[in-house]
């Protein structure tokens, strides 16, 4: 892959609420992307609760659209809230739907995660659960930097992320993802 090619990234927030810190940080990340990266945010709000009977009758169009968005993306960026020490049900549900497709769309896909919460750990436990899920689904998470936005209410104003350290980390996380995509594409061309 030419170094000048833009790494198309799909952002996925695990929170549906309007005032979500995670979605606000993801929106900020759109503005903070490093050179060589673009970021579009997926809308997963209409994905129904997983039901295998429904799946066998035919994937809902909204799920198919999400699959196509993931397939078209070079990389994924998750904004993962922490619900009861894990990922939100909304995010888990979306991943469960996608995981049933063949080919399985997360396999081999470069991905990164960050999260925001009111507590001091900034969604650390949620992020590690997401990483654990993606072991089974063969997603390729970048390891560093870890972006855990704790004490979130103090880092957002008027729905906007305004933390300088966190903003730099989001840019650095994007750069790490760009590098991972380029390395993975370069490796794929080696015979
Ligand atoms: C059902 C539920 C469970 C939660 N569990 C945790 C938790 O385990 N750890 C944590 O730090 N915050 C927890 N919180 C607080 C969320 O981190 C906080 O509501 C955060 O703002 C949610 O993300 P959002 O702003 O993107 O919607 C929980 C909130 C809800 C609604």
Image (cartoon, grey):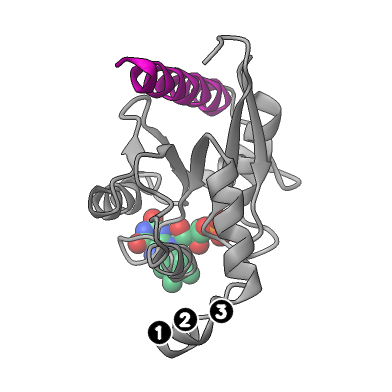
> The magenta stretch spans which residues?
165-191
Q: Is residue 182 left or right of residue 130?
A: right
Residue closer to the observer: 1 or 116: 1
Q: Residues within 10 Å of mark 3 (few under 14, many from 20)?
A: some
Residue closer to the observer: 152 or 80: 80
Instruction: Work out which quarter of the rendered image holds the C terminus and state it.
Output: top left
Q: Residues within 10 Å of mark 1 (few under 14, many from 20)?
A: few
Q: Residues within 10 Å of mark 2 (few under 14, many from 20)?
A: some
Q: Is residue 66 left or right of residue 86?
A: right
Q: CA distance from mark 2 to mark 1?
A: 5 Å
Q: Quadrant holding ligand 1?
A: bottom left
Residue closer to the observer: 174 or 126: 174
Which residue shows up at 66% across the image and 59% down it? 43
Q: Is residue 108 left or right of residue 114?
A: left
Reply yes or no: does residue 147 show up in magenta.
no
Residue closer to the observer: 19 or 191: 191
- Give the percent coordinates (x, y) of residue 104: 38, 56
- Give the percent coordinates (x, y) of residue 177: 46, 26
On the image, numbered disc 2 is attached to which residue?
55
Q: Is residue 47 above or below residue 186?
A: below
Q: Is residue 128 above or below residue 145?
A: below
Reply yes or no: does residue 168 show up in magenta.
yes
Q: Quadrant of residue 111 in the image?
A: top left
Q: CB under 8 Å between callouts 2 and 1?
A: yes
Q: Which disc, if any, is residue 52? A: 1
Q: CA distance from mark 1 to mark 3?
A: 11 Å
Q: Is residue 184 above or below residue 2?
A: below
Which residue shows up at 56% across the image and 61% down it? 15
Q: Quadrant of residue 101 in the image?
A: bottom left
Q: Which disc, if any, is residue 48? A: 3
């Amino acid at each position: 892959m030419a170094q000048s090619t833009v790494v198309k990234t799909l952002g996925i927030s695990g929170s549906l609420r309007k005032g979500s810190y995670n979605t606000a940080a993801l929106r900020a990340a759109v503005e903070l992307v490093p050179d060589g990266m673009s970021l579009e945010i997926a809308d997963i709000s209409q994905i129904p609760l997983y039901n295998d009977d429904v799946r066998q009758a035919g994937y809902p169009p909204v799920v198919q659209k999400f699959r196509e968005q993931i397939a078209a993306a070079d990389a994924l960026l998750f904004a993962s809230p922490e619900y009861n020490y894990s990922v939100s049900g909304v995010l888990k549900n979306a991943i469960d739907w996608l995981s049933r497709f063949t080919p399985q769309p997360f396999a081999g896909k470069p991905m990164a995660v960050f999260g925001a919460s009111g507590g001091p750990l900034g969604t650390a436990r949620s992020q590690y659960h997401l990483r654990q899920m993606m072991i089974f689904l063969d997603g390729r998470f970048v390891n560093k930097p870890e972006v855990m936005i704790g004490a979130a209410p103090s880092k957002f104003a008027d729905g906007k992320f305004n933390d300088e350290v966190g903003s730099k980390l989001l840019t650095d996380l994007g750069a790490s993802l760009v590098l991972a995509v380029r390395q993975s594409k370069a490796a794929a061309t080696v015979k």
